[in-house]
Image (spheres, rainbow, N blue to C red):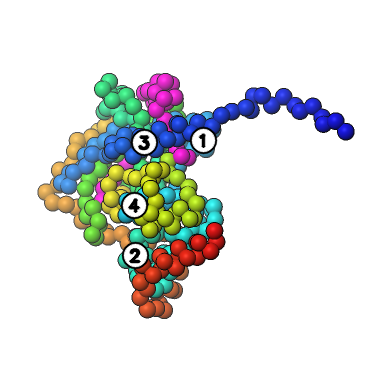
Amino acid sequence: MPRKKAPDMSKWASEMDIGATRQLIEELQAEGKPWDKLESDAKKYITNYRRICPKRPEWQNPYQIVPVHYLGPSSRMVVCRKEAGIGECPACNLRWELHDGGAEAESRQLRTSIRTFINVVHIDSDGNIPEDDGKVYLLGLNQLQFLGKRGVEYDPDEESELPLFGFFEKYGDLSHVTAGRDLLIKAKDEKSGDFDVQALKFSVAEPSPFPGTSELLDEGLVDLPEVVTIIEPEEMVAVIEGRATGTTAIAMPGAPAQIAEAATAPAEPTGGSRFGGEEAEEEETEPAATTEEEPAAEEPAAEAADDDARAAAKPPKTDPAAALKRLREQQDKKE
């Protein structure tokens, strides 16, 4: 029986652009391009004006929330396969073995962190893109900065305490091309236990059109779903061991430990600017007191409870090198 004539599917014909992905990786690995570095100071809050870029039509949101691990000597950022629902995650397996064996410091280094990535442009106090800047940056925020502290219900009327997602919940799409809102971020360097952190305060202006052009978005938007790589289990083990070549690694500027613990700080109720507060930098004679955040603040609640149950057993300390060797042997058997 002759095969039926195939329907016309020509409009679906496409080619994969590997070069574009490699270019993205090269850009992300180049210090300062296109990562957005918020200006901050140890004695005062520094004002940073931003506008979140409109999302591409095929994206669900103008931000990308990703569970990640920082692995290996170079702290390579990769997607946590378990939290992303992809499958087995060797980093999580090794983490629990180290935790159960009492090697808590090593276990903490393998915890999953929640990162959020957003395309932004720099603007001035009037909401315009400076003539000498005109490009898109990639802003990375941790769980506390974007989603807030786990289990805490924020009052939408108390904007000084809201994480950034709280403004999306209250006002809708801050990135909307005609009705979005300019964003003011005040950043200050602080200490949280042994970590250097950035305390952030957010506020938004009244609705206004996006200040950039269509050409800027076409040429400058970082493809958010491609920011963090998803790698196979065997490659993940190689990264942990430090054997991976790193040709596809995407590393955040700064030490991951310094980023993972940053917290939003309450802002003083003030008035006067289009953002609902004073735009002047806030002077402080000494660093503000901070509440030390345990790394567990970025863990799923169920895993945090499991931590307590496992810790109560107090098993003998595990040698991290031996645990990693067992992980490699298990992975080799699966291959």
Q: Which residue type carries mark 3?
A: Glu
Question: Distance of mark 3 from mark 2, alpha carbons?
Answer: 30 Å
Q: Where is residue 296 in the image (x, y as percent from the top left)?
A: 37, 61
Sequence-wise, the earlier of marks 4 and 3 is: 3
Please state which of the two labelled residues, at mark 3 or mark 2, is closer to the viewer.
3
**Which residue occupies the foreground of this view, 236 or 28?**
236
Q: Which residue type carries mark 2?
A: Glu
Please state which of the two labelled residues, at mark 4 or mark 1, is closer to the viewer.
4
Q: Where is residue 257 in the image (x, y as percent from the top left)?
A: 30, 54
- Disc 4 designates what residue? 75
Residue under the image location 31 percent in, 37 percent down? 30
Outermost left residue: 285
Is there any visible trace of residue 99 in the rendered image? no
In which quadrant of the rendered image does the N terminus lie?
top right
Sequence-wise, the earlier of marks 1 and 3 is: 3
Q: Position of residue 106 (x, y in %)?
A: 34, 65
- In screen coordinates, is 181 left or right of 11? left
- Disc 2 designates what residue? 106
- Disc 3 designates what residue? 26
Question: Distance of mark 4 from mark 3, alpha carbons?
Answer: 17 Å
Q: Which residue type carries mark 1?
A: Trp
Region rendered in magenta: 197-226
Question: Where is 106 relative to 180, above or below?
Answer: below
Q: Which residue type carries mark 4?
A: Ser
**Mark 3 secondary-structure assignment:** helix
Residue under the image location 28 percent in, 50 percent down? 255
Question: Distance of mark 1 from mark 3, alpha carbons?
Answer: 23 Å
Is there any visible trace of residue 310 in the rendered image? yes
In which quadrant of the rendered image does the C terminus lie?
bottom right
- Disc 1 designates what residue? 59
- Do the CB atoms of the residues marked 4 and 3 lie less than 8 Å apart? no
- In screen coordinates, is 221 left or right of 285? right
